[in-house]
Amino acid sequence: MGKAGRVACIFTPYVLTIASLICIIMVGLGCTKASSSTLNNLYFIRLDIQNISSAGSKTTTEIENILSEHGITSVTANDVSDVLSKLQDDSTLKDFYSIGLWGHCDGDISNNKYTTDSCSKPKSEYYFDPLQVWGLDNDAVKDELPDDYAKIMNIYKAVSKWMFIAYVLAFVTTIVEILVGIFAICSRWGSCVTTLFAVLAFLFITAASITATVLFSIVDSTAGGLLDAYGITFSMGKNMYAATWLAVVFSLAGTLFWLFSVCCCSGRSPYNHKGRERRGAGMAAEKAPYTYEPLGAGAVPYGHQHTTSYPPPAANEYPMTNANHNGHTNAYEPFRHV
């Protein structure tokens, strides 16, 4: 298979790698531009606080049972109500907050329609701190929070940092994979190197996707189950998770096809000059039909009668031929008789 076949062989993994890169870029662009409805719908999790109420729709006993189910024993239902009452009285709060990779967006809700007003400035290793965003990071509010709040936020911050780094590494290795993939056209060694970067890109994007899914699923199941009674709801961003897991699928498929190009689809043409010489060396020329052959071992082939040799052959060296005194053979080769 020649160069054309080699190009066709790596076309599929190249397209899959580009598709994975596009999905990773979409994840990174989520919640970065308030004027783009497409990017505003790319979020990991969204907090809806338009119906926040400090009273709650459940009794004090039910709230405390929910807290104990999640291992929170240092806070009471009254503590939760006190903090939420301050939020309820704050007129600067938005109706919803969408959390992305680089920041968050906020806006208002009208007739079940979400309208984004602003987005935070993109920041590396971003994590959503509700008290800081809502302007409640003062000592009065922190004193009413449970002792475990700081520990939980530290864990959330560390996991968010790792998730951000994993996405960045996935983006960088995928870019390198695309650039190195150009050399895969030339040889299988190029495919081998490209496959190594493809494996790294797949591992990083998979780790990032798993981290994001697990992290915000835990937030949704724990905080969402508790704060739902106070009118605060959480929703997972389906578009964001679709993008990140499509990146995983494309990256995996591209890795498998890059590996296939290492084993198959050589770029060397079977019709090169050296190959012809090697094959021609062991092949005898086919004889054309209706040709003459000398009868005797020492007979001269037809057409060589006028070949001069030095020294001249002896008179009896070629039987059934006539040699003149100059050594030239002018005789003919007789036909074979049946």
Image (cartoon, rainbow, N blue to C red):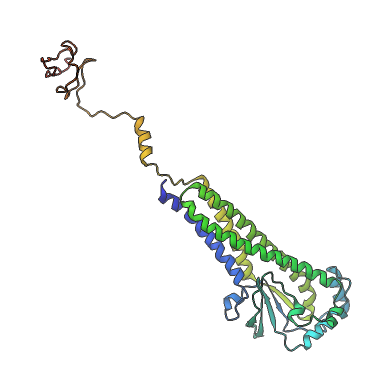
Q: Which of 121 and 251 is in front in this view?
A: 121
Above or below for 338 versus 197 = above
- Residue that extends furthest to the front in the rendered view of this protein: 311
- Which of the pair 220/161 is nearer the observer? 161
Q: Left of 129 or right of it: where is 4? A: left
Q: Which residue is outermost to the top?
A: 316
Residue depicted at x 58% and y 78%: 37
Residue 259 vs residue 305, the one in the foreground: 305
The residue drawn where x is 82% and y is 72% is 150
Above/below status of 305 relative to 63: above
Q: Where is residue 74 in the image (x, y as percent from the top left)?
A: 89, 72
Residue 108: x percent and y percent?
66, 85
The part of the image, by quadrant, that contains residue 107 is: bottom right
Q: Position of residue 129 (x, y in %)?
A: 75, 75
Q: Is residue 81 visible?
A: no
Q: Could you tell whether 307 is left or right of 105 in the image? A: left
Q: Which quadrant is home to the C terminus? A: top left
Instruction: Residue 325: give x, y in percent of width and height.
Output: 10, 14
